[in-house]
Image: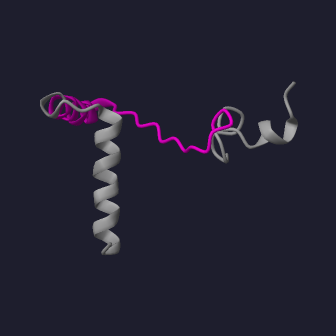
Amino acid sequence: MKKADICRNCYWAFPDNYTHVAMREARRADILWTGAEVEFYEKLKRRTLQLQRNIPGYVKEIIERHLKSESGA
């Protein structure tokens, strides 16, 4: 049985305003590379293969480092 209050706060129902994804506290950021941007994706893919990392984990690490350096943390 689905509860309306729970569903109203789910990513799958309201991807622009949610507090959970399938009952797990989570946030999503989907990135789409198009046109000339595809070249950057391919560079990212090659780099993650060299590092033996996955793309989402590597992107999250880059963002985290950037935000920490911005805030001086």
**Which quadrant of the figure has residue 44?**
top left
**Which quadrant of the figure has residue 20?**
top right
The answer to whether 4 appears left or right of 73 in the picture is right
Q: Which residue is drawn at 20% across and 33% down?
A: 48
Q: Residue at x 30, y 48 (%)?
A: 61
Q: Residue at x 24, y 34 (%)?
A: 36
Magenta-drawn stretch contains 12: no
Which image quarter is the N terminus in? top right
Identify the coloring. one colour
Q: Nearer the viewer, residue 43 or 66?
A: 66
Q: Is residue 29 above or below residue 52?
A: below
**Which quadrant of the figure has residue 53?**
top left
Q: Residue furthest top?
A: 1
Residue 8 coordinates in the image, percent (x, y): 79, 41
Residue 59 coordinates in the image, percent (x, y): 31, 43
The answer to whether 66 appears left or right of 28 in the picture is left
Q: Which residue lies furthest to the left in this view?
A: 50
Q: Nearer the viewer, residue 18 or 34?
A: 18
Q: Which residue lies furthest to the bottom in this view?
A: 72
Residue 43 coordinates in the image, percent (x, y): 17, 33
The residue range painted magenta reads 21-48
Magenta-drawn stretch contains 24: yes
The answer to whether 25 appears left or right of 14 in the picture is left
Residue 73 coordinates in the image, percent (x, y): 32, 72
The total number of labels drawn is 0
